[in-house]
Amino acid sequence: MLIQIVAPIMRPQRWLDARSDCGQSNACLHRVTKWRTLLRANWLLPAVLSTTAGAVDVIGFLALGGLFTAHITGNLVVLAAHYVTGDFSQVGPLLSVPVFVAVLGAVTVAFGADHKTRASRRKMLVLHAALLAAVLGLGAEFGPFSDADGAAALLVGMLGVAAMATQNALVKLVLPGSPSTAVLTTNTTQLTLDLATLVRRLGQPEELARARRRASLTFPCVVGFLAGCAAGAFLEIHLHLWALALPLILAVLAIPLGELWSDAGS
């Protein structure tokens, strides 16, 4: 019984292929086909990653003195405001931008030249989950933090920024055709444009088909990010930094989903 439960999670591709030979039962074939279609759908992994980013961002904001781990634009606004007012009392936003850039660059150098996309995707998803596990472990051990500029709080915050930088890199490098999973403004803009195009039926059939496909990918990301924000805020209020267990679970779930990502269908 335990093997039957764990096998689809750890090795979804092998499990789906093995189950496809249950030809004696039409009901069995129907269930396998249904699950295969759902798990191989290229909207699912970006939606899970978007939910992860939303949860990490809001938990970091609430628990680490207003630090945005996924929303670097917000940290740039904070930096600009601090520069104008001369108040650099918050260290986290100051460090987050160079840390994000450094990790993004390091991950790109490490994995960007690898032509084995599936292997690179797996490694980056594992790294992403490992960083979030470190954030949870250190946050649960040393938090909650009364001083957001303390060494432990800064370490937790920068690990969160590193995890989100890794997520941004993997979307760009190894999820071709995926919308952003951490930039709600871009996704909302693209979704609105595509929906308006479809409602008004503007353009040729090929353009409408592309708009329909983009909307089918972007909409789950927008909903996922908002759901992650809501769930993360609720859990942080009640569980403090133990709320980071939610994005960690989602990041672990993303690893087998990465095995099912269809590069050809992107």
Image (tube, grey):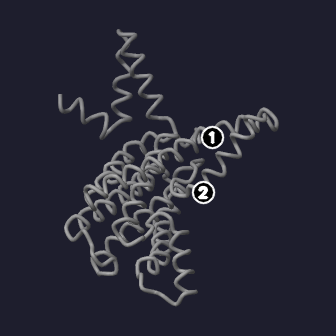
- Which residue is at a point 64% across and 45% down the rendered structure image? 191
Q: CA distance from mark 1 to mark 2?
A: 14 Å
Q: Is residue 231 above or below residue 23?
A: below
Q: Position of residue 109 (x, y in %)?
A: 50, 69
Q: State the residue position of label 2.
A: 185
Mark 2 is on which residue type? Thr
Q: Position of residue 196 (x, y in %)?
A: 73, 41
Residue 244 visible, this angle: no
Mark 1 is on which residue type? Ala
Residue 215 position by quadrant: top right
Q: Callout 1 environment at 10 Å: few (<14), some (14 to 19), or many (20+)?
A: many
**84 relative position to 232: left or right:** right
As helix, strand or loop, the secondary structure at mark 2 comes to: helix
Q: Quadrant of the N terminus?
A: top left
**45 relative position to 195: left or right:** left
Closest to the observer, 192 or 39: 192
Closest to the observer, 83 or 94: 83
Q: Callout 2 environment at 10 Å: few (<14), some (14 to 19), or many (20+)?
A: few
Q: Nearer the viewer, mark 1 or mark 2?
A: 2
Residue 202 visible, this angle: yes
Closest to the observer, 188 or 146: 146
Q: Is residue 22 above or below residue 176?
A: above
Q: Position of residue 92 (x, y in %)?
A: 41, 77
Q: State the residue position of label 1.
A: 215
As helix, strand or loop, the secondary structure at mark 1 comes to: helix
State the mark number for residue 70: none
